[in-house]
Amino acid sequence: MITTKNLTIRYGDKVALRDVSLTFEPCTITAILGPSGSGKTSLLASLNRLTDLIPSCRVDGSVRIDDMDVFERNTDVVELRHRVGMIFQRPILFPMTIRRNLELPLREHGYRNQTLLNEKIERTLVEVGLWDEVKDRMERSALTLSGGQQQRLCLARALVLNPEMMLLDEPCSALDPVSTGVVEELLVRLRTKCTLIVVTHNLAQARRISDKSAFLWSEGDGGKLIEHGETRMMFDSPREALTEAYLKGKVG
Amino acid sequence: MARRESWFPHLFDTCVWLAPVPIAGLFLWLLGDLVIRGGGAFWPVDTEVTGIRSVIVIAEQIIHFLTASPVRAGRGGGIGPILVSTGLILTVCMFVALPIGLGTAILLSEFLAEQNRFGRLVRRSLDVLAGVPSIVFGLFGNAFFCRFLGLRFSIAAGGLTLACMVLPLLIRSAEEGFRAVPESQRQAAAALGFSRWSTVFRIIIPQASLGIVVGLILGIGRAVAETAALIFTSGYVDRMPRSLGDSGRSLSIHIYDLSMNVPGGNENAYASALVLVVSLVVINVSARKLAASFLHREVSHT
């Protein structure tokens, strides 16, 4: 379970996220909704401390995963990122063979036995539905795959480490409708063993796949949490007027 | 308006296409000149030899030239010891320059933000150093390596001085290579739990290998061409060196000596220059091949 409490994220003087407190229940899909600039990506980046990569970024408040404080100095960031996987908007594959893309994270985390590696790789590719498509081209560059296949390979690469949580930043925005459908189906299947947090601009997608939703909105001085709850409830009878306006497409 | 638009693009195109011609032409003229003037050193003295035998004799002469010691101040004999000295100086230079150069490039591009004060200072210093005339490096090398560190005129001192000259080129080029790797690669690696160093060695370096190799080739090119710096540090002696502490003459110094100080040494000077240019081409090709098989082997686009 992930909890954020009074989470505020600043880049230099600019506030990207202001005072957000949320809880993400295990084995659920939560959609993070909101227009551009509402801090959705910053929220996601703070959950696996990818904010460390940006020198001007300052995080106040707390993020806890079960009983671990994410931002505490002693926290093992490598271990954290083993438990929390991330998928980006555009598929970012290494310019290496398909096999190497999947092997490298495993080797990095200490798995050396080649048979075990091959097993894990095959199992994960089957899970994302890519095995049949790539089993004969494992030694070819991952960059020769189509957009949808690449994103699924990114998912496989993250899943091969068996994470408990997956952070997805608009995973289907660069994909065509058919690939989007395949990925969405996969995310729903993953829910049984993973907690998924999906940032999305696509309200229909949020409605299709998520159990819970959180709506962020920024007036120019940092994204604030306007409303959160069960997706169906939020879409059918939103509590806040702003939420209703956004969901109906009147603003943002 | 219509008139200008119709002929200008064509003129521009023609100029652009013609531009490489003088450059390639210059190189070919240079090479041709060296072959004509220096080839005499390899040509069989006995002009009755023809056909296959002449090829064998030329090959023998080339091998002799490359291995024998200079005779009569270099008018005769070969450049064997000089090649050995040059090779040793280059090896010392690379041994020192590569780790320091790569390390600094990694520091500048991966561990320091672009606006970092220290980083900016280092970069500015390197830019200035890249333009410092080699004679200044020679004097510095003499004062510091030869006298202060007590290395005297030696291959070691020469190699170390050359390393100082090669570092700015190597670092800047390698750094550019690192910066050319998209930031997204680092993000993806970080998200997968790669440590900083793993990201550098497993993801960044293979993709930056081209920049590194170019820096290396530029550096070697500058090093091999060096005369002023080496005269003051590795010396003039044309005997076979027995250790790194021995003085040794580099190829460029030998060429200088033969053409300026030794009457009748011109032919061998040209022949030595030919060897130098051919070596540069060989180094260029092998550096790229090595990079492809070692640094770049991880990367696959097809």
Image (cartoon, grey):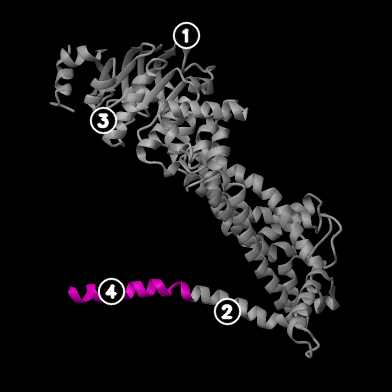
Q: Secondary structure at mark 1?
A: loop
Q: Is residue A172 visible?
A: yes
Label drawn at residue A67: 1
| Label number found at residue B29 | 2
Q: Secondary structure at mark 3?
A: loop
- The magenta stretch is B1-21
Disc 2 chain ID: B
Share a chain, discs 4 and 3?
A: no
Q: Position of residue B257 (x, y in %)?
A: 75, 74
For residue B228, above or below residue A11: below
The answer to whether marks 1 and 4 sit on the same chain is no
For residue B245, what is the image quadrant?
Answer: bottom right
Graded by Cα atoms within 10 Å as few (under 14), some (14 to 19) or many (20 or more), the crowding at tag 3 reads some
Q: Main secondary structure of the magenta part?
A: helix
Q: Amino acid at mark 1?
A: Asp
Numbered disc 2: secondary structure: helix
Question: What amino acid is found at the position of numbered circle 2 in the picture?
Answer: Trp
Mark 4 → mark 2, Cα distance in angstroms: 32 Å
Residue A52 visible at all: no
Query: To which chain does the residue with label 1 belong?
Result: A
Whole-percent x, y for residue B5 in the image: 23, 72
Instruction: State the residue position of label 4.
Output: B8
How many badges with numbers are in the image? 4
Amino acid type at image mark 4 = Phe
Disc 3 designates what residue? A36
Callout 1 environment at 10 Å: few (<14), some (14 to 19), or many (20+)? few
Task: Specify which label sits upstream in the sequence, 1 or 3.
Answer: 3
- Residue in the picture at 63% in, 53% down: B290
The quadrant holding residue A19 is top left
